[in-house]
Amino acid sequence: MGTMTIRVLLADDQVTVRAAYRMILDSQPDIEVVAEAATGTTAVAEARRLRPDVCLLDIRMPGMDGLEATRLLAGPDAAQPLKVIIATTFDLDEYVYSALRHGACGFVLKDCSPALLIEAVRAAAVGGSLISPSVTVRLLRHMTAQPTRQPARPGPDAPPPHEPLTPREQDVVAMVARGLTNDEVAAALYVTLSTVKTHLGSDQRKLGARNRVEVAARAWQHGLT
């Protein structure tokens, strides 16, 4: 049985950016770029016509921007929601919050590594979520801010883990909370990428988290960092 091919739609108003994304993604044996769009309007129309596995959208595009396109394709009112990743130059909190509120399952910066872009696409395709480490860490600053240097303690609204985490699962959680990617965690722990994914999946289940951002949030809530 052959491996599944992840079909991707690219939307960005810059031809050079689309060409770079296509080169990176098409180089992978399990990913294929099936369409490109230069505007949000075209992206929505093509996505609805082709039903790609993942849509990779820029934010600032002529006409309809990527956030509105995300709402139409993945938001709560979408009849058949698609998987959307936002890729942007603009690292602004309001963009991150709007993208996630509109249903995006990933948020990466255009200067991210090819490995992170590929990892985000693969995560979205299987129902996961990946947000650029620098963005993840910043989103958690509100939770990590302490009046002293004391370690974070579980908050009153932090539900306890469903099951105790193993020492290695705690290591993975702590590194995710610091913004490390799966590849970086694997290198730091001298384990395979599949082992990291297994531990992270167990962490999500035990912590009741839907994605790595919520895993990181639970880590700070429970003082696991």
Image: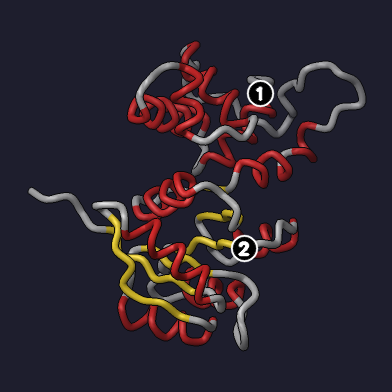
Image colouring: secondary structure
Q: Tag 1: Cα neighbours inside 10 Å, few (<14), some, or many (≥20)?
A: some
- The numbered mark at residue 222 is 1
Q: As drawn, is 83 to the left or to the right of 151?
A: left
For marks 1 and 2, the one nearer the N-term is 2
Whether 188 is drawn above or below 16: the answer is above
Q: As drawn, is 72 to the left or to the right of 6?
A: right
Which residue corresponds to the image point at 47% horizontal and 49% vertical from the top-left? Answer: 114
Which residue corresponds to the image point at 11% horizontal and 50% vertical from the top-left? Answer: 2
What quarter of the picture does the C terminus occupy? top right
Q: Secondary structure at mark 1?
A: loop
Q: Secondary structure at mark 2?
A: strand
Residue type at mark 1 is His
- The front one of 31 and 127 is 31
Residue 222 picture location, percent across and down: 66, 23
Residue 65 picture location, percent across and down: 62, 78
Residue named by callout 2: 88
Spot the residue most to the right. 147
Which residue corresponds to the image point at 65% horizontal and 75% vertical from the top-left? Answer: 60
Whether 48 is drawn above or below 20: the answer is below
The quarter holding residue 198 reads top left
- The front one of 141 and 8 is 8
Residue 6 picture location, percent across and down: 29, 59
Which residue corresponds to the image point at 51% horizontal and 77% vertical from the top-left? Answer: 72
Camera-side mark, 1 or 2: 2
Residue type at mark 2 is Thr
Spot the residue most to the left. 1
Residue 104 picture location, percent across and down: 53, 61
